[in-house]
Amino acid sequence: MPLSADGARELEPQLRCAAALLSPATGIVNSHQLMRSMLADAEAHGAMIAYRSPVTGALATADGFRVATGGDSPAEIQCARLINAAGLGAPELARHIAPYDSTRVPRQYLVKGSYFTFSGRSPFTRPIYPVEHTGFAIHATIDLGGQRSARPRR
């Protein structure tokens, strides 16, 4: 929900911004536990994980995808659904899925995120998503241990 500068300061008096976003449903997760849980759910529903098998390309077929893998034991794997979860390599992998038009793959923008931990008591009680017209802002968040941290962003 968009907030004016005054509305944001009503919630967080120490906040100085042109505007902010209030996200009452924002949550904090343990990413490792989340991934383990998602893996267990996927395997319980028939998914198979091929570790240390880098995907070198894929071909869309009438009944799914034929995926070529490299690594120690190159192989072809047939699957009904293909999820591109290659992280930073996702755009490059998408360009190797035929017959997908590689010009439709979004351009990749790499941005470095540096988090800083508050020393002492944090002035904020919730995650902060400031909207600045200057192009620079500080995103404040809370970890699972209740520690506040902040990340500058442009």
Image (cartoon, rainbow, N blue to C red):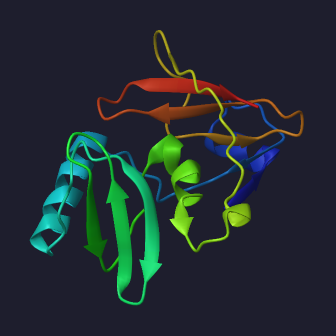
Q: Quadrant of residue 5?
A: top right
Instruction: Where is residue 152? Give x, y as percent.
Output: 67, 25
Instruction: Where is residue 135? Give x, y as percent.
Output: 84, 34
Q: Residue furthest left?
A: 44
Q: How many marks?
A: 0
Residue drawn 23% across the image and 59% down it: 38
Does 62 appear above or below 87?
A: below
Q: Residue furthest bottom?
A: 62
Residue drawn 13% across the image and 60% down it: 40
Instruction: Where is residue 59? Give x, y as percent.
Output: 45, 72
Residue drawn 21% across the image and 53% down it: 50
Q: Is residue 29 left or right of residue 150?
A: left
Q: Quadrant of residue 23?
A: bottom right
Nearest to the observer: residue 45 or residue 151: 45
Which quadrant is the C terminus positioned in?
A: top right
Does 15 appear above or below 20?
A: above
Does 39 appear above or below 148?
A: below
Which quadrant is the N terminus positioned in?
A: bottom right
Q: Is residue 93 visible?
A: yes
Q: Is residue 30 visible?
A: no
Q: Is residue 153 left or right of residue 84?
A: right
Q: Is residue 130 left or right of residue 65?
A: right
Nearest to the observer: residue 125 or residue 57: 57
Q: Is residue 16 left or right of residue 38?
A: right
Q: Residue furthest right?
A: 134
